[in-house]
Image (tube, rainbow, N blue to C red):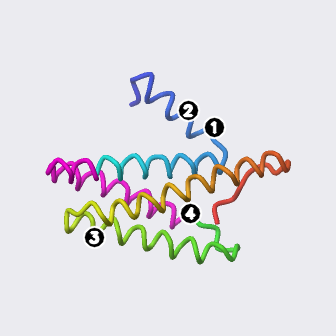
Amino acid sequence: MITSPYDKYRQSSVQTASPAQLVLMLYDGAIRFVKIGIDGISNNDLPKANQYLGKAQTIVSELMSTLNHSYDISKNLFAMYEYINYLLIQANIKKSKEPAEEALGYLTDLYETWIQASKLAVSGGTAGVQHG
């Protein structure tokens, strides 16, 4: 049962978000979790690193599973997500910041691209942007 006002707000935000907003929320969460995972590695807090890199992997897996494969770009996005997931796994196994930082760079670039695509969709009168 959701009791805190923040959790209620968050649930409401997800339920009322457009598809493009949901994708942006997923990217935002993945970026946030990778940063926390990198912080865990930096501070030798290995349980924290494992937990948050794992959460980022879960989000990347969700992005992979929600791709609309009727678009040609989906194949490229799937390969990119697969590589990002690989980097996160390597960072987690080796407790190395470098692969996580590389993954963070890709996630940040994809997030910024989605922001631009969302703006174009709104200004072009399109109801929403589909994921891949």
Going by the image, does 5 lie left or right of 37?
A: right
* Badge number at residue 12: 2
| Disc 1 target residue | 16
Going by the image, does 5 lie left or right of 45?
A: right
* Amino acid type, label 4: Thr
Q: Position of residue 101 (x, y in %)?
A: 36, 59
Query: Quick one: label 1 or label 3, which is nearer the N terminus?
Result: 1
In the rendered structure, are the residues bearing label 4 and label 2 in contact, judged by CB atoms less than 8 Å apart? no
Say few, some or many: other residues with alpha carbon within 10 Å of mark 3 (under 14 / 14 to 19 / 20 or more): some
* Amino acid type, label 1: Thr
Q: Which is in the foreground here, disc 1 or disc 3?
A: 3
Say few, some or many: other residues with alpha carbon within 10 Å of mark 4 (under 14 / 14 to 19 / 20 or more): some
Q: Is residue 56 magenta?
A: yes
* Amino acid type, label 3: Gln
Out of 17 and 120, give the one closest to the viewer: 120
In the rendered structure, are the residues bearing label 2 and label 1 in contact, judged by CB atoms less than 8 Å apart? yes
Q: Which residues are magenta?
A: 38-66
Going by the image, does 47 lie left or right of 85?
A: left
Q: Quadrant of residue 95?
A: bottom left
| Disc 4 target residue | 66
